[in-house]
Image (cartoon, coloured by chain):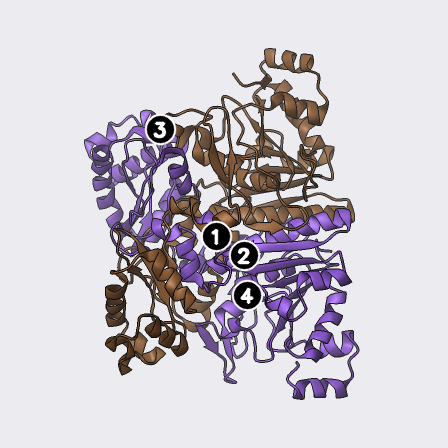
Chain colours: A purple, B brown
Amino acid sequence: MAALSSCRVLDLTTPLGHLCGKILGDLGADVIKIEPPAGDAGRSRAPLYTDPSGARHSMFWLSYNSNKRGITLNLESPAGRELFLRLAKDADMILESFPPGYMKSLGLAHENLAAQDSKLVYTAITPFGQTGPYREFCAEDLELMALCGVMSLTGYPGKAPLRISLSQSEGWASLYAAMGTLTAYHYRQRSGEGQFVDVSAQAACVIQCVHAPFFWDYNRELPKREGEFMTGRTITGAKFRAIWPCKDGYLTFIIYGGPAGQKTNRALTEWMDSKGLAPEFLKTKDWNQLDVNVLTQAEVDQMESVIGIFFAGITKEEYMKGVVARGMLGYPVSTAEDVLRDDQLTARNYWQSIPIAGRAEPAHFPGEFAKFSEMRCAIRRPAPTLGEHNSEIYTQELGISTERMMELRAARVI
Amino acid sequence: MSDMKTPQALDDVVVVEFAAFAAGPCVGKYLANHGAFVAKVESISRPDGFRAHYPPFKDNKRGVNRSGVFAMNNDGVYSVGINLKSPAGVDVARQLVAKADVVIENFTPGTMQRLGFGYGDLRRENPRLVMLSTCNLGQTGPRAQHPGFGSQLTSLSGFTHLIGEPNQSPVIAYGPYIDYIAVGFGFIAILAALEYRRRTGLGQHIDLSQYESGVHFIAPAILDCQLLGTIADRMGNRHATAAPHGVYPCQAPDTWCTISAFDDQQWTRLAGAMNNPGWAVSRRFATQLGRKENETELDALLAQWTRQQDATRVMARLQEAGIHAAKVLNVAELYDDPQLAHRHLWGKVTPQEVGLHHVENPAFKLSRTPHVDPRPEPALNEHTDLVLRRLLGMATQQIDQLVDQGALERTR
């Protein structure tokens, strides 16, 4: 048994909410992804893999729609709405990410459905929320990353703020949507009362600024982007290099204080010394006394200049082995390929092998987001193909006749 | 267990937290935001590291009750002073755990076992207990014991490689980006385990690797390198298909706006909103492929247009025309953004030593059980009496004795 194995979810979301439905599916819910007959926008999100039959598969779609069954349904046709209401009767949760007011225009808003079932948890995920001055604004990842503040903290001073080159806002919106949905579900299981969950992607994305807003709130200091450097760690204003070129890429290392940092600094000095690269000032430093909070820029620069020379001569793999053997803080800057090869993930059986059409070898998908002692949250089924479960759900479960199915298909209702 | 009269979605949940920094405590904060009673076990000799080591401190004066990054992760939580080096203190902590629905810890794997607080120990006394152990790389595996911080784990897990301009050094994400992905998944895992317990009567242990939960946010790149043989790389602000898709300078220093067009209709609307300057209606920009082909020139021309204008007005004007556009807010502007203000993202609290400041309210709004106004982050050991009275029914005299023995601590 899984946590949500008695729970049915209707997932009407666009890419903004795909991960939310997947998380609920991972927890055992019966998630039905409902797409327009032409298919969800996520199916055409680049990059795409074309299988030998010519069918195209989006990496985004495959990633965030496992553990869902898939049906097609045109909500804008009266027959489609009628089918949706029949499905909704057995649903515990509904997820949607249409523009505010769209479901209402179809007569399928929370208030319409709650009249039929007061236990329903109804989650709406939008870029900015259901109400407010930006509610009609259109936004994809770039706009959300801009309006949540995080881009102002990413990139080089004086140059254009940057986003992460792989869309992140959908992940954040979906994560907070799943949190909100489960919070509401917890209450419903106690009280029998469902409710409406209004999720703002912009608000969810603000967490990416982490504690930067608190510098402004507390001291009217404005943190900004500093490229490869970390700021905000001292009362002197010194910045610390966090990204270092190495032989075959980049690695991350930061001069830390505290017990772990002191140990790291000592171990690095020894490591450098073993290659004859530790100058006297580094070897004679009393690391136990190092207080990062009060380091000046000149002190930081002096240490970093010699550390950089050492790092330039080692590979990512050598660095990883070294930091592990020496108990130091630090990691390589990994590519997706490095992540796939990581022995820690392999040892924990993180990857899940999922067959891919036209490929002899299965692909490794990210597996359980957590390891539970009493249940699994692994992939039980891959992302559905378009309309894959139409007959299973409409014919076998709703009892719609084959003839009626043909009519519905011909009318593009399904 | 809530102080409030309004029903709170999680006000039936009692949490005991043995956690520090971001990844553990922020889960407790989020549970508290919806009414859970969260007791954070601390002591003067072992306060949450964010209290002591990390700015911002109010007015740049260090102090255990002056940290903004601590406040961010702990509003609504109660601090109970227990000295775990004292056997009597350990005994009190065990009694608290016996009353708890949830324990959250984020020590290095093995630490809780050494303290006698491993899941096996705790479960014997409280089989209904849900315990979240969250750490960098998980409780098992060859590198489980290797120490690490979230800001660097963000690099190990593939994010940093994807930030920056092509063929240049990657740049960092500000702070421990991946920690907060793990916070969300940790919160979700706890509510899932509580639902499992409601149905079966059984508690359970959750081993959450921040690395593993974080990699879900780069899942498409993991598939790219297997199915397409391409390793996802940084590409500034550019997009695989959309053009324009960038950040452009505006009139005032260091003000910027984004503009993006995902199809030719959006581009035509954008040209119209700029009053159709000659270059914008030229054929080389008429199609998506043409704009991609000539993107560097396109970006430069758009920047010439935006440089004459105010970023907020660019956003308003282009959004009015149905075009994707936004102002790049700095973190100060987050407090004034009309949409975030409309949603009351920032709550106000007034802890004694720091005075009025803001904390983040939940990003989701619940119609029937809205979160109530936040409570301030706790001063170190502020709620020793409150927690022990409430959960264990201890009398003040009993607490006095344990304080005298050095097992318990109160605010000094």
Res. B225 image quadrant: bottom left
For mark 3, what is the residue?
A: B60
The mark nearer the N terminus, 1 or 3, is: 3
Q: State whether residue A297 is above or below residue A94.
A: above
Q: Find the distance from the CA under tag 2 to the CA under tag 4.
A: 9 Å
Looking at numbered disc 2 in the image, what kind of residue is underneath it? Gly
Instruction: Please say whether residue B317 is visible from this viewpoint.
Output: yes
Which label number is shown at residue A99? Answer: 4
Secondary structure beneath disc 1?
Answer: helix
Looking at numbered disc 4 in the image, what kind of residue is underneath it? Pro
The reply to whether the C-beta atoms of the residues labelled 1 and 3 are less than 8 Å apart is no
Which label number is shown at residue B339? Answer: 1
Q: State whether residue B103 is above or below residue B208.
A: above
- Chain on which label 1 sits: B
Looking at numbered disc 3 in the image, what kind of residue is underneath it? Asn
Looking at numbered disc 1 in the image, what kind of residue is underneath it? Gln
Closest to the observer: B339 or B412? B339
Tell me the quadrant of the picture where the C terminus of chain A can be found.
Answer: bottom right
Do marks 1 and 3 share a chain? yes
Query: What residue sits 34% from the left and 80% below the top?
Result: B287
For mark 2, what is the residue?
A: A129
